[in-house]
Image (cartoon, coloured by chain):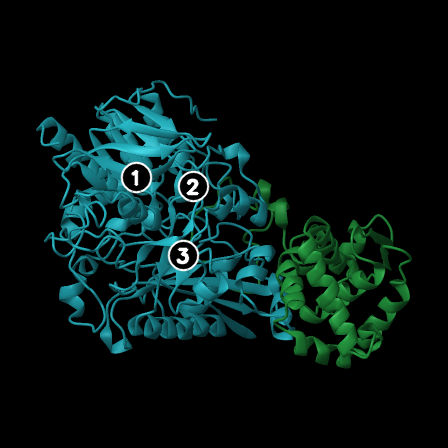
Amino acid sequence: MLDQSMNRRRFLKGSGSTLMGTLAMTSMPIAILAPSRSWALELQQLDAHQGEVLLTLTRHIFPHPTLEDAVYALVVKDLDAEAAANPSTADTMRSGIAALDNRAGGDWLALDDEQQGMHVRAIAGSDLFRKVQSTAVVSLYNNEMAFRHFGYGGERGDAGYLSRGFNDLTWLPDLPASASGPVPGMNG
Amino acid sequence: MENYDNQTTFAHDDDNVVVIIGSGAGGGTLANELAQKGIDAVVLEAGKLHTRGDFIADEWASFGQLAWLDNRTTSGTWRVARDFPNLPSWIVKAVGGSTVHWAGASLRFQPHEFRAASEYGDIPGANLLDWPIDYDDMAPYYDRAEDKMGVTRTNGRPGLPGNNNFKVMHAGATAIGYKNCHTGNMAINSEPRDGRASCVQRGFCFQGCTTGAKWSTLYTEIPRALATGHVELRPESQVAAIEHDDRGRVNAVVYFDAEGREQRQRARAVAVAGNSIETPRVLLNSASSQFPDGLANSSGQVGRNYMRHMTGSVYASFDEPVHMYRGTTMAGIVQDEAHHDPSRGFAGGYEIETVSLGLPFMAAFFDPGAWGRDFTEAMDQYAHMAGMWLVGEDMPQQRNRVTLNTDVKDAYGLPVPNVHYDDHPNDVAMRQHAFQQGTAIYEAAGANKAYRTPPYPSTHNLGTCRMSTHARDGVCNGYGQTHDIDNLFISDGSQFTTSAAENPTLTIVSLAIRQADYIARQMADRAI
């Protein structure tokens, strides 16, 4: 995770209120979806540092080593939108991020992965932590890129899997007819 | 697509109609059964009308569309109170009620389950009671319900084809010696039937069945009831209270319509089918000087004995992919633990049924509140996971109850329901056993790791207006007619004296058919 986090530092040098990154291409299904390797997120309420802290904090709370930053950025996007819509949420984030930086000697992002994690464990249960956790548990796993990464069909299932793999598992014995039933439109 | 236009309307002061509160398995079925007999009814449904074409193949978006999200509070030691303090149940607020969301499992109760008190003996802390009816009373109505709903493996109908998730369950279950494992008795068409298509294995059973292969009152009972010209459906009608006359007979239902205006529908009889949280809430909110503890509550049992089934889930990861989300959510069952065998260390039994969640709900429900590597490493296994839901009989307890929380009001100024639940030691012992057996099934199929997932918010809400032989012990008789008020009926799972191990919908539908016959006789006899 350390190497990745250094990569991220290189790519996340947002200027003004834009969070930018480049796909690491570690996850081919996402690369297929992406129109280009670069991505950018314009922030409405938070500054680039705050956005970067939130992204990295989310990576600590829900660490998936090969999941692209572009997916984590969707969590930041939702947090930023909430901050824009709700001043008290914005205050929670700003003061929480400031407190995290403060307890880390001024710049939590400058610490290595292990030290960052130590501070995250210390703030578990804080308002900032819970806000990020409760937002991320939805945002991080509720998007097409995550579906591709984790191998979930999402709305592609809407048409039905009857002829598209609902029973394509071959590493176990076939079901006896007595335990199963006929596949409509097919023999047996 | 079905026609939902009212063919008839009734005046608010028409006191010849039966008012049915709720349009799910109980209310929707009762409406159609009464309508087919020529009895006029008004159905008050709190939720909106969403037709099949409106359903969304997206878990969170669908949840926002269909789930009952009105504020509720919780208390007790159950984990749901900690994880989802304002969402004790996962049910539907829409026309069709929770038959929009249900997975379709349609199992008859076992004969002994109607005699839980006699069969299980004295269990400290359990408020067990035998049902006032037995299996033989129910058998002909189970026949009619299975036929109505097109339940697989009944009446010569084939089973559904097993999906990947079931292949894993079947391999493991047979490896450890279970004998009764198949793709279930499902109210999902395995072949086209009753004007509805056969299942195309979408995997969005919980989000509403767009093809109509899964039975729901939304596109069977309700449009058929409307077509008779004897039923008027009023969606977005939130019932506040039931009123009564000086003789103590109910005579009107007060509700808020879609515009939030208070309305009053006069009634010859009232049937309450708002699911086991709203049903007692309505009775309690209807307290009057004559009935200071709420309607039909001379026993003090309204709201008590809230049951939600012993539940839990086991997910397991394998070397090879499973893709459990493909195909019917409840794709198969193991019934070898459903019997009563106290040598296992608990009374009653449980069913083992496949379950799958999409990635978004897996994140939300797998281990609520969890974070860090243990959680994410499990999520990384998503495509290689199989899943099962464990569902068994839980013990009725007096203190597990729905009460009015007068500190918290809803949009209409009415107290919201508080749901209190503590696991009984019998529930805990059963869950432990079920977790062990579920884990053994997956290990026998080659699992790398099995995960025990705590109960979700309850979809099976039962027992809060229970049936009893004697008026002192419960709220209604064996027909759901309240002991205290002859023309007030309970028509949903609130009637259940005990929970039994099985998914409740088939029994709710069977009871509704039986109740319709009874109401028709009572009306013909001018008893009500």
Left of A36 or right of it: where is B361?
Answer: left
Which hue is chain B drawn in?
cyan
Reading the image, the residue beneath label 3 is B458
Q: CA distance from mark 3 to mark 2?
A: 21 Å
Identify the chain drawn in green: A
Q: Earlier in the sequence, mark 3 or mark 2?
A: 2
Reading the image, the residue beneath label 1 is B241
For the residues carrying marks 1 and 3, which lies nearer the camera in this image?
1
- Disc 2 crowd, CA 10 A, few/some/many (<14, 14-19, 20+): many
- Disc 3 crowd, CA 10 A, few/some/many (<14, 14-19, 20+): some
Task: Say if residue B457 shows up in the picture.
Answer: yes
> Badge 1 sits on which subunit?
B
Q: CA distance from mark 1 to mark 2?
A: 33 Å
As helix, strand or loop, the secondary structure at mark 3 comes to loop
Q: Position of residue B326 (x, y in %)?
A: 55, 52
For the residues carrying marks 3 and 2, which lies nearer the camera in this image?
3
Q: Position of residue A115 (x, y in %)?
A: 77, 81
Q: Amino acid at mark 1?
A: Ala
Q: Nearer the viewer, residue A32 or A106?
A: A106
Do the residues at discs 3 and 2 belong to one chain? yes
Task: Say if residue B460 shows up in the picture.
Answer: no
In the picture, the disc for residue B214 is 2
Q: CA distance from mark 1 to mark 3?
A: 25 Å
Left of B469 or right of it: where is B208?
Answer: right
Q: Residue at x 55, y 74 (%)?
A: B449
Q: Residue at x 51, y 57 (%)?
A: B356
| Residue found at the very far front of the displayed protein | B289
> Badge 2 sits on which subunit?
B
As helix, strand or loop, the secondary structure at mark 1 comes to strand
